[in-house]
Image (cartoon, rainbow, N blue to C red):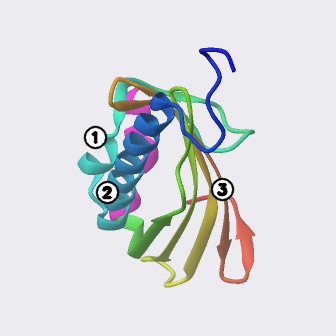
Amino acid sequence: MSGTDTPQGTVPELAVDTRTLGRSLIDTFGRGWSKGDLDLLMSVYTPGVVFIETPFSQPLTGHDAVRRFWADVPYSQSEIAFSSGEIYAAGPWFSSEFKCRFQRKRTGQWVDARGAIFCETEGALISEMRMYWHRWNGGSETSKP
């Protein structure tokens, strides 16, 4: 085994650190979404963050653009419950599955959102988030959060 090989059953140091950081960032992001606390949700991002909601979405770049994307959460969603799965890490990247269930304030319909989040970190913050998800709303799939 060379010096760059990792013995089977051990985790490279960077992956452990990224996994721990990823858990903290996803938990903070989830608390911000669940509480409708836009400042808390946005606290996980670098100033120049790139956010991509789906594989077909145009990237949103920078705090202002991403904040506009999430800005209606406190006004349009209630009874929000967010959970995430195990954090997988590789270098500065981490990913996790997630579930979010909420009620639309205007219609009263329940939405069940499930997907995966893929993030690149820079320092202790997220510099890129790809959030690929599906929303089940009132018995049918929808495209809007």
Furthest residue toward top? 3
Query: Callout 2: 10 Å neighbours few (<14), some, many (20+)?
Result: some
Three-letter code for the amino acid on which mark 3 is drawn = Trp
Which disc number belongs to residue 43? 1
Residue at (68% x, 38% y) in the render: 57
Disc 3, SS: strand
Question: Of residues 17 and 136, which is closer to you in this image?
Answer: 17
Distance from the alpha carbon under mark 2 to that under mark 1: 9 Å
Task: Give the Cα separation between the discs numbered 1 and 3.
Answer: 22 Å
Residue 22 lies in quadrant: top left
Looking at the rendering, the stretch of residues picked out in magenta corresponds to 62-74
Amino acid type for the residue under numbered disc 2: Gly
| Horizontal arrangement in the rendering, residue 21 relative to residue 132 (left or right) | left
Is 69 one of the magenta-colored residues? yes
Residue 133 badge:
3
Q: Amino acid at mark 1?
A: Ser
Question: Residue 19 location, x and y as percent?
Answer: 46, 43
